[in-house]
Image (cartoon, rainbow, N blue to C red):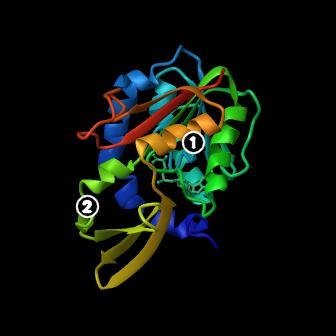
C-alpha cells in the first residue's frame, strides 16, 4: 500500500491537519480570497477534498461544489460536515491519478499540499492533465503547495504541535534526491502510545510547477504566494499556481 492510500493515516493525524482552528481560517480565506472569486454558480471541484474544510465555505460563496477524495473516512467526514452546515456538495470517491469528468468544471482546486504524491514524475503531470480534461474551456486550475523556496527558509527545525486533548505531534522534514522530494515523518504521542507515519512527495519550485502546468496544456500560468493574491517571493508561505484552459 502506498502511504497516501492508508486511510488510518489521514484519520489518526486529522486533529493536527484538519483542526477546528484551521477550519475557521479556511472559512475566512474562502470568503475573502480574490483567487477564489468566481461568478455565482461556478462549478468548482475540490480535488483531494479531505474532510471538506473548503467545501462548506465554497458552497456558502455560491458555487456548485464537488469534492473528490480517495479516502472513504475523509469522505464520510466531508459528508457529515456538509450535512451539519446545510451545504450542498456532490462527493465522489476517486483517485486523482485517473479521475476525469470531461468539460464538467469551471474551476479545479487542489489545496494544502495534495499534489506530488506519486513516485513517477509523469503520474503527477497526469493529475494536471486530468484536471485540464475535466475543465470547461476558459476554466482554471489552482494548485496550492509548500514551494521549494518557502521550505528552504525553515527546513531542518522539527515542529511540535500540541493538540487540545494534550496529545502532541512532532514533525520532522527531510529533503531527498537533491531537493526533488521531501519526506515528512510524524510522531503522534498520546499518553503512553506513539503512532508514526511517513509521507513522501515531490517538491516544486515556482518555476518547476509553472512549467508542469504549461506541459499539461495550461495558458496564462501565474504563481502567487497566498490566497490573498500576493506575488510569490521571499516572504511567501505558500506556492499557489494558477493556469487557464483555452
Ligand atoms: C493533505 S490532505 C488535504 C485535504 C484538503 N485538501 C484540505 O485542505 O484539508 C490530502 C488529501 O488527499 C487525499 N488523497 C491522497 N491521495 C489521493 C489520491 N491519489 N486521489 C485522491 N485523493 C487523495 C487524502 O485522502 C487526503 O484527504
Identify the residue at image location x=54%, y=39%. 211
Q: Position of residue 173 (x, y in %)?
A: 34, 67
Label 2 beta carbon within 8 A of ligand 1: no
Foreground residue, 152 or 93? 152
Between marks 1 and 2, how big is the CA–CA gap?
39 Å
Residue at the image position 59 percent from the left and 51 percent from the top: 75
x then y, percent, for residue 117: 55, 58
SS of the residue under disc 2: loop
Can the viewer see residue 53?
Answer: no
Residue 101 appears in the rendering:
yes
Observer-nearest residue: 117 or 27?
117
Residue 1: quarter of image: bottom right
Crowd rating for badge 1 (residues with CA inside 10 Å; few <14, some 14–19, many 20+): many
- Comparing labels 1 and 2, the label whose residue is closer to the camera: 1
Residue 142 falls left or right of residue 178: right
- Per the image, the residue denoted by label 2 is 164
Q: Residue 98 location, x and y as percent?
A: 73, 49
Q: Earlier in the sequence, mark 1 or mark 2?
A: 2
Dot 1 and dot 2 residues touching (CB under 8 Å): no
Task: Look at mark 1 in the image and give the residue it sits on.
Answer: 212
**Mark 2: few/some/many CA within 10 Å (<14, 14-19, 20+):** few
- The quarter of the picture where the C terminus appears is top right
Q: Residue at x 29, y 46 (%)?
A: 21
Q: Is residue 87 left or right of residue 144?
A: right
Vertical side of 78 occupied by 216: above or below: above
Residue drawn at x 61%, y 65% is 5
Amino acid at each position: 500500500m502506498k502511504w497516501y492510500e492508508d486511510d488510518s493515516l489521514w484519520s489518526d493525524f486529522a486533529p493536527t491537519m484538519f483542526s477546528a482552528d484551521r477550519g475557521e481560517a479556511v472559512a475566512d480565506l474562502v470568503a475573502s480570497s480574490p483567487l477564489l472569486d468566481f461568478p455565482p454558480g461556478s462549478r468548482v471541484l475540490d480535488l483531494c477534498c479531505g474532510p471538506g474544510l473548503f467545501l462548506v465555505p465554497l458552497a456558502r460563496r455560491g458555487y456548485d461544489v464537488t469534492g473528490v477524495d480517495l479516502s472513504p473516512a475523509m469522505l464520510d467526514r466531508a459528508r457529515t460536515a456538509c450535512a451539519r452546515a446545510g451545504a450542498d456538495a456532490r462527493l465522489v470517491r476517486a483517485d486523482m491519478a485517473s479521475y476525469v469528468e470531461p468539460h464538467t468544471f469551471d474551476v479545479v482546486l487542489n489545496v494544502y499540499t495534495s499534489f506530488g504524491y506519486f513516485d513517477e514524475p509523469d503520474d503527477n503531470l497526469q493529475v494536471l492533465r486530468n484536471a485540464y480534461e475535466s475543465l470547461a474551456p476558459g476554466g482554471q486550475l489552482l494548485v496550492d503547495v509548500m514551494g521549494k523556496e518557502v521550505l528552504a527558509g525553515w527546513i531542518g527545525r522539527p515542529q511540535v504541535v500540541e493538540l487540545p486533548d494534550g496529545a502532541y505531534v512532532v514533525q520532522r522534514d527531510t529533503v531527498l534526491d537533491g531537493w526533488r522530494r521531501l519526506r515528512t515523518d510524524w510522531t503522534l504521542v498520546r499518553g503512553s502510545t506513539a503512532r508514526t507515519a511517513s509521507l513522501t512527495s515531490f517538491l516544486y519550485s515556482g518555476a518547476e510547477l509553472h512549467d508542469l502546468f504549461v506541459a499539461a496544456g495550461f495558458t496564462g500560468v501565474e504563481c502567487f504566494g497566498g490566497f490573498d493574491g500576493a506575488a510569490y517571493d521571499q516572504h511567501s508561505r505558500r506556492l499557489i499556481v494558477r493556469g487557464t484552459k483555452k
